[in-house]
């Protein structure tokens, strides 16, 4: 299995440091970062130089909302120097680096957290008790007892590369990446750990084997010896917590227990977790850290059950503006059924723009959410968004946003959580089912990750692996989703399988979802008098109006430009043509030229009125807009984003079922081709299947049963 | 509302004490019980003799699975003596009874826990004998003069015959003598304003019937108060150096929110407000109170080096 996508480009972080800098000791520069502020400081220690400070990416954004968080890259990796002498990599040097960083950022005492600490955190706590207010050790390999010798000598030439024979100087020199693959596959023994493995391998490739070899002569010398461990443990004065996975394949659980015993400290075992629980089980580890560090104490007010108002929290994905519209429609219907229901929204731009326009209450903690649509834009290229990989590369943001949700859910009593493609909510609730404390409804308009053809075997493997994890989640914890609502009908579900040896998507979805029908958020009957709407929108008699829109994200700029380039030729073919280009909230309309019959506008509220009244629309392959056009029986051209599996497979399948729209290929659609298509389609009568108008009411009815 | 309870026969307990006994201070015998074992001990103060140590019945079995729990009946009710002079019911007497129970049970330090008057006594013990206090958990604490008292007690004179029995006019010795049960039913209906509180009210009335109007009047109206100014009350709170948890029901008809907030502020403690709850959350919302007490202990354990 070969990993590693574009290791060079770091994925969007959920939070960026407020300060960063270097400390220098004996000519070695160490790079540090500081996030957030607060009474307490948490120092996240690097582990050995095989990875760098990004290994704390699942902790930083959450902790930094409550405390100051300081990280640094180990000498030998990340943005720190790569000294070449063996002595520079003694564990005491890392402890001194930590002290220098604390001095530099002006922190007197910190809670020190070490992952796979080989001695630096222990040295720091033992020799500088005044600087360490608490010590948490995750999967520590240190032990008061002698370890078993490694199976293979590190320095000898071996006649095998199998398994741990890869932990050998000569293999490292031959295939460092191969070793990283092996090492981190053993680090993350939990199934479905592709992303953590890829991340760590990527960080391991940011250093080089020569640097690693400069500081490594085998584990017996890399880690502190038992005598030193015992001696240091006796000197630790601060509170200590040890946590260790029971499925840790790199460090036996017993070592953590022995060390905890030596430190007279509690040990929390994580059953089934491997060597990197803070990466693989980040919710649990974040909550442990929060409690250990005394952050975010329990809420100061409790409301007795029958004194609680009836409340729902709507978590609405910002990826695609359509969720906002349909969720507002569902919320309105829900209030009709449950009139005393209060609905709060946990949402971010651009969803909040719609919510504010509708007078909905956006929960103030929404401001803490890490930006998802910005990340999606940063992952896109010219009319191209590999949305599966872009979504995977959002793991840090999703977790950070789940933790924001968790804070809200802990502090306020909601009867019901509704997540519309709120991936973080659905995923981490199944990973941490004990955190579910309200009724929960999952809404989606597609089921199943599908690979793009040019992703090859690796992408087919990955999508199947994610699907398998989701199927296992639902099978193991059917109680987590109290309702699963598919926005559409069962025929809208693709016929594909989830992957090799996995069920067919449609069969499985029929078994595990209720079908609400399509939820449009408006009633096309309102536009029955199209001439009246056209007049209200300022369309002139005889005009042929073409609306060009790319939804709420900034990904569509290239398509807008391409269609604008087609305008002159289209205008020749259709002299009455008036083209209205809607740039959306994230694209600057001033970036585009205007001409006679061509106008470019920013965000248009109630765009659906234009889409109901126009003679032709040109859109991306997003579901919401395409289905609005279908419901209004307007002709349209749609351009699925390249590498966007949802637009290329799921949406396209649904539109074909309705007989709606003309699919265009951005690759081959030159301005001339587009102009020709505009001329052929504009004003055409259509024979689409009718779109149901009761989807929101049906969804609300099913949801209301839980209140 | 008709209350039909066989007050004589105590209902089956979830847990019975492992040890029990009496402490004798100046000829007054106070009955105590000890449940469970463990390095950490809760001393659950009683409140005024209007009640008994059974008021903690929803806490004892849970806490005793994790900690040692000490309770005692207030002088004037339960299995404790009923001295008949007001001086025997001074605040400091109850505080010293608590300290004597710690001694008898050979416990050096405990989480001093109390409700209403008992909350005040816990704070007083922590203030004057800090070595005994691991922490203080005070529910709706009564600290005289710290703030103005609850207006419910200010409407009518206690000693004078009144021409009405309505509402808080029942806080009157003549009414108590006429219809002590009627008074208790009224009083505890006020202290348990949550709907569907019949069982808790019945329990409290039954425990209240364990004393008599004259004894209760000595304790609640005639006994000397421990001080006579807000400054002295504040000084007691400020002298508490251990961690403090204050719990207060927002519908409390006995102790005000202002008083609970003042205790938290002056002791540097944490105030947890309970929306929709009355004066007796340990009875009416026992799960929440038990968990708050547990979390409080755990926070103390985390603090310990």
Image (cartoon, rainbow, N blue to C red):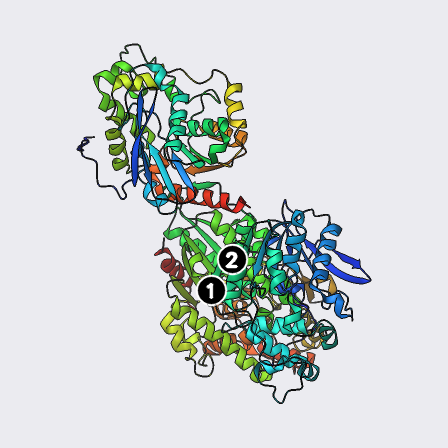
**Does residue A690 appear in the picture of this structure?**
no
* Residue placed under numbered mark 1 in the picture: A431
* Disc 2: host chain: A
Task: Tell me residue A428's x, y (percent).
Answer: 49, 62
Question: Looking at the picture, does residue B231 appear above or below residue A49?
Answer: above
Residue B300 or A593: which is nearer the viewer? B300
Counting from the top left corner in percent of width and height, residue B238 is at: 54, 27
Badge 2 density bin: few <14, some 14–19, many ≥20, Cα 10 Å: some
Distance from the alpha carbon under mark 1 to that under mark 2: 30 Å
Side of B106 where B177 appears, left or right: left
Locate residue A510, reporting x and y percent: 37, 73
- Dividing the picture into quadrants, the one containing residue B291 is top left
Query: Residue A261 has which mark?
Result: 2
Q: Nearer the viewer, residue A239 or B24?
A: B24
In this rendering, does residue A702 appear at all?
A: yes
Q: Residue at x 60, y 49 (%)?
A: A237
Vertical order, A119 against B167 (above or below) = below
Indicate the position of residue A536 as horizontal and vertical percent values: 57, 57
């Amino acid at each position: 299995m070969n990993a590693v996508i574009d290791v060079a480009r770091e994925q969007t972080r959920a939070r960026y440091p407020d300060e960063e800098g270097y400390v220098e000791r004996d000519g070695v520069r160490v790079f540090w970062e500081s996030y957030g502020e607060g009474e307490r400081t948490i120092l996240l220690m690097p582990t050995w130089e095989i990875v760098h400070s990004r290994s704390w990416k699942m902790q930083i954004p959450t902790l930094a909302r409550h405390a100051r968080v300081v990280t640094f890259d180990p000498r030998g990796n990340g943005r720190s120097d790569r000294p070449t002498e063996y002595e520079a990599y003694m564990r005491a040097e890392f402890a001194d680096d930590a002290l220098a960083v604390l001095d530099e950022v002006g922190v007197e005492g910190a809670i020190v957290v070490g992952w796979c600490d080989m001695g630096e955190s222990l040295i720091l706590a033992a020799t500088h008790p005044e600087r360490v207010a608490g010590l948490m050790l995750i999967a520590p390999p240190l032990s008061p007892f002698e370890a078993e010798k490694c199976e293979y000598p590190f320095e000898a030439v071996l006649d095998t590369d199998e398994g741990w024979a890869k932990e050998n100087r000569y293999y490292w020199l031959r295939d460092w990446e191969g070793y990283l693959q092996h090492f981190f596959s053993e680090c993350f023994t939990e199934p479905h750990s592709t992303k953590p493995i890829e991340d760590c391998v990527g960080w391991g490739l940011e250093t080089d084997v020569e640097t690693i070899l400069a500081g490594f002569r085998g584990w017996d010398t890399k880690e502190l010896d038992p005598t030193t461990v015992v001696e240091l443990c006796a000197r630790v004065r601060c509170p200590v917590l040890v946590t260790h996975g029971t499925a840790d394949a790199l460090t036996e659980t017993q070592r953590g227990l022995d060390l905890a015993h030596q430190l007279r400290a509690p040990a929390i075992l994580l059953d089934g977790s491997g060597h990197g629980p803070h990466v693989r089980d980040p919710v649990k580890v974040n909550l442990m850290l929060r409690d250990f560090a005394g952050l975010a104490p329990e809420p100061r007010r409790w409301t007795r059950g029958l004194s609680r108002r009836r409340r729902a929290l709507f978590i609405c994905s910002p990826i695609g503006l359509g969720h906002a519209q349909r969720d507002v429609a569902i919320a309105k219907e829900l209030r009709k059924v449950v009139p005393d229901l209060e609905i709060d929204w946990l949402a971010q731009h651009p969803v909040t723009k719609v919510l504010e326009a509708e007078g909905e209450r956006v929960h103030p903690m929404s401001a803490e959410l890490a930006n998802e649509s910005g990340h999606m834009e940063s992952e896109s290229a010219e009319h191209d968004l590999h949305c599966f990989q872009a979504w995977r590369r959002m793991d840090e943001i999703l977790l950070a946003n789940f933790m924001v949700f968790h804070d809200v859910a802990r502090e306020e009593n909601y009867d019901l959580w509704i997540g519309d493609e709120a991936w973080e909510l659905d995923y981490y609730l199944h990973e941490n089912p004990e955190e579910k404390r309200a009724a929960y409804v999952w809404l989606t308009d597609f089921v199943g990750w599908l690979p793009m053809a040019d992703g090859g075997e690796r992408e087919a493997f990955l999508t199947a692996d994610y699907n398998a994890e989701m199927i296992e989640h639902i099978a193991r914890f059917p109680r987590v989703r109290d309702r699963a609502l598919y926005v559409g009908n069962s025929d809208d579900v693709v016929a594909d399988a989830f992957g090799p040896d996995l069920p067919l998507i449609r069969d499985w979805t029929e078994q595990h979802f209720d079908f609400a029908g399509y939820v449009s958020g408006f009633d096309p009957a309102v536009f029955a008098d199209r001439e009246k709407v056209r007049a209200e929108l300022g369309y002139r008699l005889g005009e042929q109006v073409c609306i060009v829109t790319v939804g709420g994200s900034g990904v569509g700029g290239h398509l807008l430009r391409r269609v604008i380039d087609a305008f002159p030729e289209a205008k020749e073919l259709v002299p009455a043509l008036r083209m209205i280009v809607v740039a959306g909230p994230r694209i600057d309309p001033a970036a585009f030229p205007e001409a006679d019959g061509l106008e470019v506008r920013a965000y248009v509220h109630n765009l659906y009125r234009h889409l109901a009244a126009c003679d032709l629309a040109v859109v991306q392959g997003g579901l919401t807009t395409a289905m609005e056009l279908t419901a209004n029986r307007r002709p349209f051209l749609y351009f699925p984003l390249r590498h966007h599996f949802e637009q290329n497979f799921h949406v396209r399948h649904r539109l074909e079922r309705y007989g709606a729209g003309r699919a265009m290929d951005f690759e081959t659609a030159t301005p001339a081709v587009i102009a020709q298509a505009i001329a052929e389609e504009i004003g055409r009568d259509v024979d689409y299947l009718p779109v149901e108008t009761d989807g929101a009411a049906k969804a609300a009815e099913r949801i209301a049963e839980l209140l | 509302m008709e209350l039909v309870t066989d007050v004589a026969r105590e209902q089956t307990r979830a847990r019975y004490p492992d040890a029990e006994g009496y402490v004798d201070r100046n000829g007054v015998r106070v009955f105590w019980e000890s449940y469970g074992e463990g390095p950490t001990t809760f001393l659950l103060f009683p409140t005024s003799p209007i009640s008994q140590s059974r008021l903690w019945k929803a806490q004892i079995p849970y806490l005793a699975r994790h900690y040692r729990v000490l309770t005692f009946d207030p002088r004037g009710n339960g299995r404790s003596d009923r001295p008949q002079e007001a001086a025997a019911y001074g605040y400091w007497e109850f505080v010293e009874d608590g300290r004597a129970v710690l001694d008898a049970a050979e416990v050096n330090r405990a989480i001093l826990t109390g409700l209403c008057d008992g909350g005040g006594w816990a704070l007083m013990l922590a203030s004057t004998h800090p070595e005994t206090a691991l922490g203080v958990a005070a529910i709706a604490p009564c600290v005289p003069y710290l703030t103005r008292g609850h207006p419910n007690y200010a409407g009518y004179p206690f000693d004078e015959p009144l021409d009405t029995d309505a509402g808080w006019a029942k806080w009157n010795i003549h009414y108590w003598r006429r219809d002590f049960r009627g008074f208790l039913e009224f009083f505890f209906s006020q202290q348990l304003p949550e709907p569907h509180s019949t069982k808790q009210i019945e329990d409290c009335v039954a425990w209240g019937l364990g004393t008599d109007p004259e004894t209760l009047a000595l304790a609640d109206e005639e006994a000397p108060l421990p001080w006579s100014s807000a400054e002295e009350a504040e000084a007691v709170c400020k002298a508490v150096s251990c961690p403090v948890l204050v719990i207060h029901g927002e519908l409390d008809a006995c102790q005000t929110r202002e008083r609970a907030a003042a205790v938290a502020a002056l002791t540097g403690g944490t105030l947890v407000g309970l929306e929709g709850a009355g004066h007796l959350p340990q009875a009416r919302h026992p799960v929440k109170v038990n968990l708050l007490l547990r979390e409080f202990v755990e926070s103390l354990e985390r603090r310990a080096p």
